[in-house]
Amino acid sequence: MPNNLYEKAKELISHTGDRTTHHRIRTLATLLAEQHALTHREIEERLNVKGQLDRVTLYRVLEWMSKKNLIHKIAGDDRVWRFRVNTELHSHQHAHFICTRCTKVTCLNDFRIKPDPSLPLGYLFHEIELTVKGLCAECA
Amino acid sequence: MPNNLYEKAKELISHTGDRTTHHRIRTLATLLAEQHALTHREIEERLNVKGQLDRVTLYRVLEWMSKKNLIHKIAGDDRVWRFRVNTELHSHQHAHFICTRCTKVTCLNDFRIKPDPSLPLGYLFHEIELTVKGLCAECA
DNA sequence: AATTAGATGCAACTAAGTTGCGTATTTTTT
DNA sequence: AAAAAATACGCAACTTAGTTGCATCTAATT
Ligand SMILES: [Mn+2]
Ligand SMILES: [Mn+2]
Ligand SMILES: [Zn+2]
Ligand SMILES: [Zn+2]
C-alpha cells in the first residue's frame, strides 16, 4: 500500500482521541486501499505479507473502528462480516450489493433509501438496511 | 400445537411430491403456529418437548423446506438463520424488521419495495432485501 | 525516566452449521 | 404382502467465525 494511505489512516485514527497504534493504522490503510468490503480473513492475508498481527487483535481493531465510525460492517449470507472504510461521501445510509457467485460486496452509494418506513403499532424505527443480490460485472 | 396445523403441514408437504415424513410435518406445523421467524435452536426446543429429533436432521429439514419454497430464511447480525413459513399472502419480496434488543424478527408484509434498482454498469439484478432495525412493541 | 491506562498475543473456548456413513423408514415394484 | 430401491435419519466428528481471560507489552502522560 502507498505511504500516503498510511499517513491518512494515521490522521483519521488520531482524530478519534484514542491511541494511534501501528496495527490500527496498518489495518485502516489496508481498508482505505480497497474498493470492496473485506472479510477478516482477507484483511489478515493482506496484512501478514510483511509483519504479522494476531487474529484476535485484528478482531478487536475492527470492532474498535466500527465503534469509532471509521468503518462499517456488513453481514452476509455466509455468516461472515465484511468491513469497509467510511469516507465522507460514503457514509451512513446506503445500500449494499452482494454478488451471489463471488460473494464480493459493493457499496451502492448513490442508492437512495426512503428514511422513514411505516412500522406496526408500537415499533420504534432505528435504521434501514438494503441489500441487493445478483451478479457483479466480473461474474455476469 | 393444534392438530389442524399438523394436517395442513402434511398437505403442504405432500404437494411437493417428495416424502411426507413425520419430522418434516412436525417442523412445518411448528413454523405454521408462529408469528415470528424462529432460529434452529428455537424450533428444536419446541419440537423436543415431546419426542425428539436430531439437530442435524432439523438442519436438513429446514434446508429442504427452503429449497421447496415452503419457508424462507433470514440472515441476522448474530450469524444465526431464522426461518419463517411462506403463506400465500406472505411470499417472495418483503421487508424484515429486526429488534436490536430481543433479536426477534418480524416480516413486514405490507412493505412495498421497488423491484428494479439501478446498478453499476454490467451488474445483474437478482433480488432485493430490506431490513429495518429498531425496537419491537414489547421492547420499545 | 517512571507511571499508568489501554492494546496485544496466546491459549482455550463457544456455537452455528456441515460432512460421512451406517441404519431405518418411506415408497415403488414384484 | 413381501422384496427392492430410494431416500431420510441419527450419531460422531469436523469446520470455521468469532469471543474470553489473562499475562505481557506499549503509547501517551507526568
Ligand atoms: Mn457500505
Ligand atoms: Mn419474511
Ligand atoms: Zn461476482
Ligand atoms: Zn424486541
Image (tube, coloured by chain):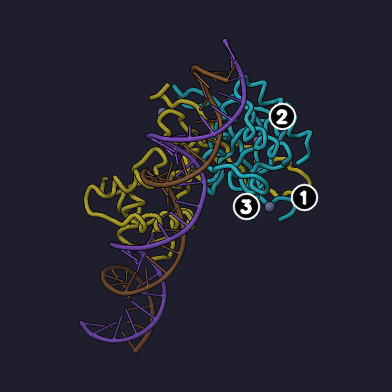
Chain colours: A cyan, B yellow, C brown, D purple
Q: Earlier in the sequence, mark 3 or mark 2?
A: 2
Q: Chain of mark 2?
A: A
Question: Is the residue under label 1 in contact with that under label 3 (CB below 8 Å)?
Answer: no
Mark 2 and mark 1 on one chain: no
Foreground mark, 3 or 2, reads 2
* Location of the C terminus of chain B (image quadrant): top left
Q: Mark 3 near ligand 3 (CB under 8 Å)?
A: yes
Q: Disc 3 and disc 1: Cα gap in Å?
A: 15 Å
Q: Which residue is mark 2?
A: A87
Does dot 2 land on a helix, a strand or a loop? loop
Q: Disc 2 and disc 1: Cα gap in Å?
A: 25 Å
The disc labelled 3 sits on which kind of residue? Thr
Q: Chain of mark 3?
A: A
* Location of the N terminus of chain B (image quadrant): top left
Q: Is residue B12 left or right of residue A119?
A: left
Q: Position of residue A101 (x, y in %)?
A: 64, 55
- Determine crowd level at label 3: few under 14, some 14-19, many 20+ residues with C-alpha closer than 10 A: some
Q: Residue at 75% x, 30% y: name it.
A: A7
Q: Which residue is mark 1?
A: B122
The disc labelled 2 sits on which kind of residue? Thr
Q: Chain of mark 1?
A: B
Foreground mark, 2 or 1, reads 2
The answer to whether B94 is drawn above or below residue B4 in the figure is above
Does dot 1 land on a helix, a strand or a loop? loop
Q: Position of residue A62 (x, y in %)?
A: 58, 35
